Image: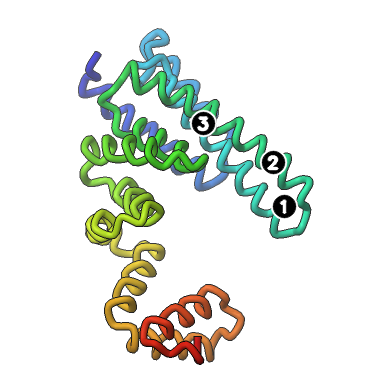
């Protein structure tokens, strides 16, 4: 059933508070918000899906935390812990997907649910499913910069240059101060004007000689202009 104006306002407020709680790592507050949203209207839920979208979102947050721990273990050289954490994260992402898919079936007009579902798919490398979910999210949330940014990332992973440029430009309009978007715009400009990019990257190399990402990009640009010796 469609949400009334009051419920839509409450839903927007709860979702904003959830995002703030995650940013502040206030998981106790997050759990309270999920419970309130799920029990709204005698259990129908603020999402009109018996709270499945909020439960799925909560599971997705847990999975992201575990994934971050996995990366930390890898960086620390603890391969055994990293392997165990990776398996745990995969299980948590699949649990989140199950809840979000159920929520989507019950409330198919929720752009936020499609966005979270696309994010969960992306995390376990289901790129085609992620793309489909994120495109639906973009149709429902045309002014949501996070959705546009994620679509740019998926297009990049799929080597779809046309879609990447389209969504990158849209992301820039909606999130003009985002660091990842700014970096992608620089890279795109460097690819079109590699010699200018080389000058910038060489200056950065002098400032940060151990920046591996910059060195790799510099080598790529040298190859673009046919300077294999420098590359």
Nearer to us in this view, 172 or 18: 172
Which residue does the image show at 35% across and 20% down from the upper left? 46
Q: Is residue 49 left or right of residue 212?
A: left
194 horizontally vs 220: left or right: left
Q: CA distance from mark 3 to mark 1?
A: 23 Å
Q: Nearer the viewer, residue 219 or 134?
A: 219
* Labels 1 & 2 near each other (Cβ < 8 A): yes
Q: Nearer the viewer, mark 3 or mark 2?
A: 2
Residue at left 24%, top 58%? 162
Identify whether 83 is placed above or below 189. above
Mark number displayed over residue 112: none
Residue drawn where x is 33% and y is 83% of the image: 194
- The disc, 1 or 2, on the residue closer to the chain's N-terminal end is 1
Q: Residue 58: which numbered mark, if any?
A: 3
Mark 2, secondary structure of its residue: helix
Q: Is residue 229 above or below residue 31?
A: below
Q: Nearer the viewer, residue 158 or 188?
A: 158
Question: Few, some or many C-alpha atoms within 10 Å of disc 1 (few <14, some 14-19, many ≥20)?
Answer: some
Q: Tell me the element at label 1.
A: helix
Where does the image place residue 193, in percent across and percent down from the top left?
A: 28, 82
Q: Residue beneath label 2, please?
A: 85
Where's residue 134, x and y in %? 32, 40
Q: Which color scheme is applied? A: rainbow
Residue 3 in the figure: left or right of residue 24: left
Q: Which residue matches tag 1?
A: 73
Q: Do callouts 3 and 1 mark residues in contact (Cβ within 8 Å)?
A: no
Local packing at callout 3 (Cα closer than 10 Å; few below 14, some 14-19, many 20+) is many
Q: Earlier in the sequence, mark 3 or mark 1?
A: 3
Q: Quadrant of the N terminus?
A: top left
The answer to which of 2 and 37 lies nearer the viewer is 2
Mark 1 to mark 2: distance in Å?
Answer: 8 Å
């Amino acid at each position: 059933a469609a949400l009334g104006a009051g419920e839509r306002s409450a839903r927007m407020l709860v979702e904003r508070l959830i995002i703030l709680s995650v940013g502040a790592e206030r998981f106790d507050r997050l759990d309270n918000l999920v419970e309130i949203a799920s029990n709204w209207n005698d259990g129908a839920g603020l999402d009109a899906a018996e709270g499945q979208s909020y439960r799925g979102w909560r599971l997705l947050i847990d999975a992201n935390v575990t994934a971050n721990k996995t990366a930390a273990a890898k960086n620390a050289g603890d391969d055994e812990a990293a392997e165990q954490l990776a398996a745990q994260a995969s299980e948590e992402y699949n649990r989140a997907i199950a809840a979000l898919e159920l929520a989507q079936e019950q409330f198919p007009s929720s752009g936020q649910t499609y966005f979270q579902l696309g994010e969960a798919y992306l995390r376990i490398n289901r790129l085609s499913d992620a793309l489909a979910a994120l495109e639906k999210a973009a149709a429902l949330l045309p002014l949501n910069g996070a959705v546009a940014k994620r679509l740019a990332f998926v297009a990049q992973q799929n080597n779809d240059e046309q879609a990447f440029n389209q969504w990158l430009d849209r992301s820039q309009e909606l999130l003009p101060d985002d660091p990842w978007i700014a970096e992608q715009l620089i890279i795109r400009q460097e690819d079109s004007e590699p010699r200018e990019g080389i000058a910038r990257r060489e200056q950065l190399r002098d400032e940060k000689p151990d920046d591996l990402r910059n060195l790799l990009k510099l080598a790529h640009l040298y190859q673009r202009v046919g300077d294999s010796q420098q590359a």
